[in-house]
């Protein structure tokens, strides 16, 4: 009898978790339904819209395209992990507020997580790099100018880190 | 629909796990796997996760060419100093794939095994003359040119128990040039209406010594435009020669009517983009 469940261990936002999951469980459902981390949103479910962007071992990925069983031992960061332990919002989160880079908010977790990954890798990201990284993080409210300006403001003065 | 999941530690174990079960599927990055699974297009009994296989990782310079492990992500290929230095057109083609999230997840081996004729890696790899290294049962190894690897839509020459080890790209001569263009009338992360990869080797006297052209979105597999190539090889390129040669591509491809264009339109656009690619390469 083939085993169709597995025990996996993940570190999510600094907390260690061990869960028994079905082998076809997707990371986005594991985060939201099993760990109650509902900051990561579900949108297109085909890897196109960017709502479910999370960091896996520091790399930005679509949680809706990831079978969790293949991530055993990984370190995950979601939007819930960006603020400091005292609740102080991260530089990226504060820049989004300062630049009016959100409206309805459903794309904001994915936008903020993606921008955080960008600025960690490219603290002085160019305009082209910002557009390349943020392409595919769809927003239907803001028209993107505020999002771009928020990220560009951090890239310009190096305070993203 | 769930499945058994195994993560072999070596190639023989992986080959055995893939060969023992008729509906076993290999899992690399997982982009195509997850989409096909959710749409019910695959119902694997066993999934063989490849991530522990160190032989499938890494990008290295190899006798002036490149050796790219099957698990190299599109992003790793895009950013690799070896790829950028030795085959800049390959780095550029991978940099233009979908979005950063997909490039971070999808792998070159997974892309080739998926055999979607609208995706970007196959045409540029065919134009560069790349070869796929395949591992099989009991240590068996074989190599297949990328252009001979695809047999139909989502279908390859891989047999049960075989998996892609990596891709080798032959060395480019100093005057070799290559380019990949995709015609994207809808959005930048869409599949192309048609895409064209071309490589050209120019003689010192200005004649075209070698040329390879491959198209995506142009048939059930990537299509090599041999008649166009034959029309330019050995000739000194002029605007007229290139225009007449590019027009031959219309009848070399076998596209379908879909939301990205009619068959007739795709044949016209293929000719336009082959002409532009060749014009750019001989300029």
Image: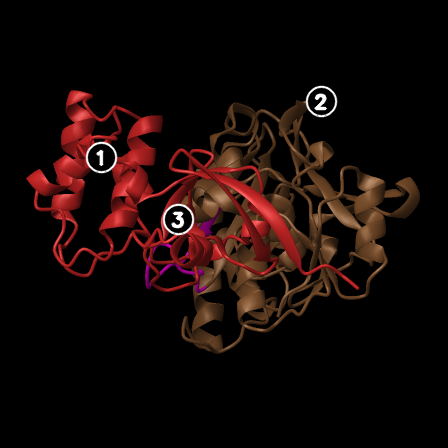
Chain colours: A red, B brown
SS state under label 2: loop
Residues tagged 2 and 1 counted as in contact (Cβ below 8 A):
no
**Other residues around mark 2 within 10 Å, as few (<14) / some (14–19) / many (≥20):** few
Asked if residue A97 shows in the view, the reply is yes
SS state under label 3: loop
Q: Which residue is mark 3?
A: B99
Name the foreground residue: A156 vs B148.
A156
Name the foreground residue: B264 vs A35.
A35
Q: From mark 2 to mark 1, how far is it between C-alphas?
A: 37 Å
Q: Which residue is mark 2?
A: B63
The chain to which mark 1 is attached is A
In the image: residue A39, left or right of residue B22? left
Q: Which residue is mark 1?
A: A127
**Other residues around mark 3 within 10 Å, as few (<14) / some (14–19) / many (≥20):** many
Q: From mark 3 to mark 2, how far is it between C-alphas?
A: 32 Å
In the image: residue A155, left or right of residue B259? left
Task: Give x and y (percent) for residue A106.
Answer: 23, 58
Q: From mark 1 to mark 3, how far is it between C-alphas?
A: 16 Å
- Identity of the residue drawn at 25% across and 54% down: A107
Q: Which residues are magenta?
A: B178-193
Q: Is residue B147 magenta?
A: no
């Amino acid at each position: 009898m083939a085993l169709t469940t597995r025990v996996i261990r993940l570190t999510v936002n600094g907390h260690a978790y061990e869960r028994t999951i079905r082998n076809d469980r997707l990371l986005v459902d594991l985060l939201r339904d099993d760990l109650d981390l509902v900051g990561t949103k579900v949108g297109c479910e085909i890897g196109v819209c960017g709502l479910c962007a999370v960091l896996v071992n520091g790399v930005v990925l679509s949680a809706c395209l990831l079978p969790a069983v293949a991530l055993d031992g990984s370190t995950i960061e979601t939007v819930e992990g960006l603020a400091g332990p005292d609740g102080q919002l991260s530089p990226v989160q504060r820049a989004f507020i300062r630049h009016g880079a959100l409206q309805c908010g459903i794309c904001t977790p994915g936008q903020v997580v993606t921008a955080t990954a960008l600025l960690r890798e490219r603290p002085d990201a160019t305009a082209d790099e910002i557009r390349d990284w943020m392409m595919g993080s769809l927003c239907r409210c803001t028209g993107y100018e505020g999002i771009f300006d928020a990220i560009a403001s951090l890239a310009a003065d190096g305070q993203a880190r | 629909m769930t499945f058994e999941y195994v993560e072999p530690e070596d190639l023989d174990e992986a080959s055995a796990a893939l060969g023992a079960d008729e509906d076993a599927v290999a899992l690399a990055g997982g982009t195509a796997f997850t989409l096909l699974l959710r749409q019910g297009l695959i119902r694997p009994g066993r999934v063989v996760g490849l991530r522990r296989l160190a032989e499938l990782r890494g990008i290295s310079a190899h006798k002036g060419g490149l050796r790219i492990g099957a698990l190299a992500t599109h992003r790793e290929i895009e950013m690799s100093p070896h790829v950028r230095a030795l085959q800049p057109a390959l780095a550029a083609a991978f940099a233009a794939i979908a979005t950063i999230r997909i490039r971070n997840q999808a792998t070159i081996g997974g892309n080739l095994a998926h055999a979607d004729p609208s995706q970007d890696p196959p045409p540029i790899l065919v134009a560069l003359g790349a070869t796929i290294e395949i591992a099989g049962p009991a240590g068996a190894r074989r190599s297949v040119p990328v252009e001979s690897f695809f047999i139909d839509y989502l279908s390859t020459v891989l047999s049960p128990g075989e998996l892609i080890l990596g891709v080798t790209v032959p060395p480019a001569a100093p005057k070799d040039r290559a380019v990949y263009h995709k015609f994207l009338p809808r959005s930048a992360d869409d599949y192309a209406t048609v895409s064209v990869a071309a490589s050209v080797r120019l003689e010192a006297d200005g004649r075209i010594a070698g040329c390879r052209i491959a198209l995506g979105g142009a048939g059930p597999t990537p299509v090599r435009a041999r008649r166009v190539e034959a029309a330019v090889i050995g000739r000194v390129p002029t605007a007229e020669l290139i225009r007449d040669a590019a027009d031959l591509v219309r009848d070399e491809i076998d596209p379908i009517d879909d939301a990205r264009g009619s068959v007739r339109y795709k044949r016209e656009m293929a000719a336009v983009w082959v002409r532009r690619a060749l014009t750019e390469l001989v300029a």
